[in-house]
Amino acid sequence: MLLAVLLGPVFFTLLQTSLHEGFKAGSHLAFGVLLSDVFWIVVAYLFAASLDFTGKYKTVFAWSGGLLLIAFGISILMKKIKVREVDDDRKTVHAKFVLKGFLLNSLNPGVPVFWLSVISVVKMKEHYSFAHEALFFGCLLTTVFSLDLLKSFVSHRVKELLTPVVLHWMNRIIGIILIGIGVSLIIKLYA
């Protein structure tokens, strides 16, 4: 539950995407985040002992993630607000939103560190079999994905209450927050 409600870049991007592009786009973004989490769980599970996120990998992930967040923030700041009806009945798959969710989550250096720490705690439970671990992570991922879908649904439903001015300021705030998070990731390397 805590993971799903953290106010990080994925949270703000999910809300922004759902507001501007509709529930279907928000759900595709959430699916990309889910795929990223599955990827990092598998990587962390298979290579937990051999990965070193405190050395050069930390620098690579911090710079990559930081620059990606800054780029997303700048693009949101520069985006023109268009209040329009959203057609959720389109047959197209929003592959760009799946990719955006995957990259946004994957390049956040806190994500692999988080999953490595969860796996180390789970691995300390010697009485857990692989089936127990799979059930634990399955339930965890289902909960997070369900809450992401709920956030997307709710934010899309309140769209009718938002004026173009409010949407403009929300975009500015979200863009500034994403840029701030990206800059802080890079600054933390040298602090």
Image (spheres, rainbow, N blue to C red):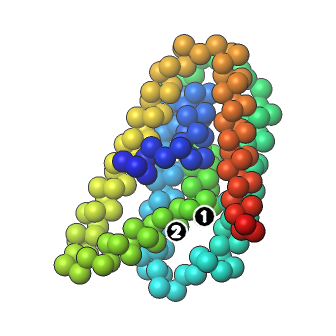
Q: Is residue 73 left or right of residue 17?
A: right
Residue 109: mark in rendering? 1
C-beta proximity under 8 Å, tags 2 and 1: yes
What is the count of numbered marks? 2
The vertical placement of 137 against 86, above or below, is below
| Residue at the image position 71 percent from the left and 23 percent from the top | 168
Mark 1 neighbour density, 10 Å: few (under 14) some (14–19) many (20 or more): many
- Residue 35 x %, y %: 48, 57
Where disc 2 sits, the SS reads helix
Quadrant of res 106: bottom right
Mark 2 neighbour density, 10 Å: few (under 14) some (14–19) many (20 or more): some
Q: Identify the residue position indicated by label 2 in the image.
A: 113
The vertical placement of 91 against 160, above or below, is below
Q: Nearer the viewer, residue 28 or 8?
A: 8
Quick one: which residue is furthest to the bottom in this view? 50
Q: Nearer the viewer, residue 23 or 67?
A: 67
